[in-house]
Amino acid sequence: MSDAPVQCWFVEREFGDRNVVTIVYATPDGSRYQQRERSSASLRTGSPVTAAVEVPESALEPVDDEETRTRYATEAERTANRYAPDDPV
């Protein structure tokens, strides 16, 4: 895999314990993703979570199961249709 950037769309946000929020961006077809963790404090004071991000291809993980792949593809399409890539979500 290369380090060419791939546009990924916001597909999931999960609020966990320890005031950590897990954010998932996925490719439009739902086949690959990147998971990020941010503290709830950094979400309030830091850079916003945007509808899309550019992720180096080598930093993407494969989505192993079909159900998750389909859900990510559906959510990526929904996000792309509702927001511009730099819009906060």
Image (tube, rainbow, N blue to C red):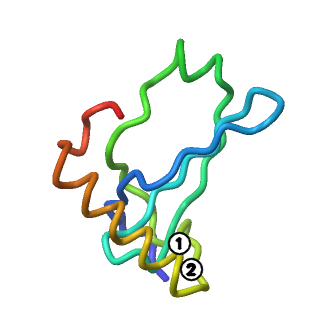
Compared across the picture, whether 65 is left or right of 51 comes to: right
Helix, strand or loop status at disc 1:
helix
Q: Residue placed farthest to the right in the image?
A: 18
At 66% across and 37% down in the image, what residue appears? 15
Helix, strand or loop status at disc 2:
strand
Identify the amino acid type marked 2: Pro
Of residue 42 and residue 79, the one placed in the foreground of this image is 79
Numbered badge on residue 62: 2
Q: Residue placed farthest to the top in the image?
A: 45
Mark in the foreground, 2 or 1: 2
At 36% across and 34% down in the image, what residue appears? 89
Identify the amino acid type marked 1: Ser
x and y, in percent, of residue 67 in the image? 52, 81
Compared across the picture, whether 63 is left or right of 18 comes to: left
Q: Badge 1: few (under 14), some or many (20 or more) residues near its Cα, within 10 Å?
A: few
x and y, in percent, of residue 24 in the image? 53, 54
Of residue 77 and residue 54, the one placed in the foreground of this image is 77
Which quarter of the picture shows residue 18?
top right
Numbered badge on residue 20: none
At 62% across and 44% down in the image, what residue appears? 14
x and y, in percent, of residue 62 in the image? 56, 80
Compared across the picture, whether 48 is left or right of 52 comes to: right
- Marks 2 and 1, how far apart in space? 11 Å
Of residue 38 and residue 2, the one placed in the foreground of this image is 38
Q: Which residue is mark 1?
A: 58
